[in-house]
Each structure stands twice: as C-alpha cells, then as structure tokens.
Image (cartoon, grey):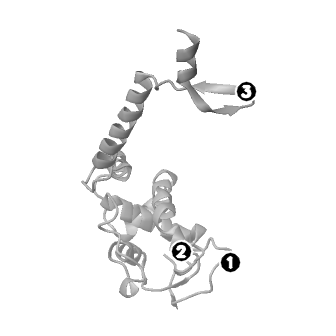
Amino acid sequence: MNAKSDQDLLLDHNYDGIQEYDNPLPGWWSGLFVGTIVFSVLYLLYHHSGVEGRSIYDEYEREAAEVFEKRFAELGELSPDKETILKYANDPKWLAVGEAVFKANCVSCHGDGGLGNVGPNLTDDYWKNVESVEDIAKVIANGAAGGAMPAWKNRLSHPNQIVLTAAYVASLRGKGGGGGKPPEGREIPPW
C-alpha cells in the first residue's frame, strides 16, 4: 500500500497522536453477535412463552415429585389418623420430611419453629380450629378461618406430605419455651 491509501483508511479522530484505522469487524465476530441475538430470541420464546413444563420451576416441581414418590414408596399411603400422626411425630427420619415441608410452606405465617407470626403459635396448648391431633391434618389439607389458612391438599405433590407435616406440627407442641406469639384459641388436652 502506498502512503495515500493509508491516509484514506485512518479515521478523523486523533487522541494523543494515536489514530485508528477504519477496518470492518471480523466476520466471525459479527456472526457471533448475530448468533447471540438469534439464540436469545429463541431462548425467550421457548422458556418464557407460558407453555407448561418448560420453566425451571416446573422442572423443580417434577423432580421434587419424583423424589417424594421414591421416598414415599416405602410408606405407602398414610392415613391422617391419630396413631399414624403420633407415630411419625416420634420418627426422626420422617419428621425431617415434615419439617422440610413446614419450612418451605408454613414458616412465613407460623414463624420459625412454629412460634407464630401472622398465623397462630403452634407450640403452646391453645389452638384454633384444632381439637384433636387428627384436626391438624384436616386444617392443613382444607384450610381454615375463611381463607386465612390456605388449603394445601392441591398444592403439595403427595398426600403423605400432609400427614408428615401434621406430625411435625404435632411434635412442636410444648417446645416453645413460653416464647412466641401469645396464645390464641382454646386450650386442648394433650395428644
């Protein structure tokens, strides 16, 4: 190249004596940019189009349901009766499952450890909507107080989660140490 053509390729701006050539971007770089834009549009359409089963939340729900199905296969279908709830309230392995469900879904209203927040304190002897240990599972499944406590039977992935959560809630009674929200409801006899 001659000096004249070099002058034509230089851009007009000059910073501290440094000049820049007016060269086009490399083809692979432009292709990568266009490919990224196309991929982003396709990704957005695929994952955020509102079709069920494609979001990470749907994938999590599927995988969690599979895990619960495998774990609950050894239990079979649990009945929400007094003997079953009290049996699992004293079984650390399955009590941990109930505690996990409680922490994932109930802590926002009932507080950490069931000490009460917006919902009632579950560690004292005063209960609302519960007269026996079986009523805990009914309240979890069907809700209570005109919607203040939502029904969970259609929200949890397996019916055994209700029974194990009821067992965990039953195990909280007497563990508050006098702390938490003041008593609400009526005093009920021990389980």
For residue 6, which numbered disc appears in the image? Answer: none
- Badge 3 vs badge 2, beta-carbon distance below 8 Å: no
- Badge 3 vs badge 1, beta-carbon distance below 8 Å: no
Q: Position of residue 107 (x, y in %)?
A: 53, 68
The extreme top residue here reads 1
Say what secondary structure mark 2 lies in.
helix
User: Which numbered disc, 3 or 2, marks the residue that appears first in the sequence?
Assistant: 3
Q: Exactly how many numbered labels are in the figure?
A: 3
Residue 54: in sight, yes or no?
no
Q: Is residue 43 above or below residue 82?
A: above
Amino acid type, label 1: Gly
Near-viewer residue (85 or 36): 36
Mark 1 crowd level (few <14, some 14–19, many ≥20, 10 Å Cα): few
Write the residue at 64% across / 73% down: 176
Near-viewer residue (50 or 42): 42
The extreme front residue here reads 4
Q: Which residue is label 1 attached to?
A: 179
User: Which numbered disc, 2 or 1, marks the residue that appears first in the sequence?
Assistant: 2
Mark 2 crowd level (few <14, some 14–19, many ≥20, 10 Å Cα): many
Q: Which residue is label 3 attached to?
A: 17
Near-viewer residue (41 or 21): 21
Amino acid type, label 3: Gly
Amino acid type, label 2: His
| Labels 2, 1: front one | 2
Say what secondary structure mark 3 lies in.
loop
For residue 110, which numbered disc appears in the image? Answer: 2
Say what secondary structure mark 1 lies in.
loop
Q: Position of residue 119 (x, y in %)?
A: 52, 80
Q: Is residue 121 above or below residue 155?
A: below
Q: Position of residue 160 (x, y in %)?
A: 34, 59
User: Which numbered disc, 3 or 1, marks the residue that appears first in the sequence?
Assistant: 3
Write the residue at 49% across / 57% down: 100
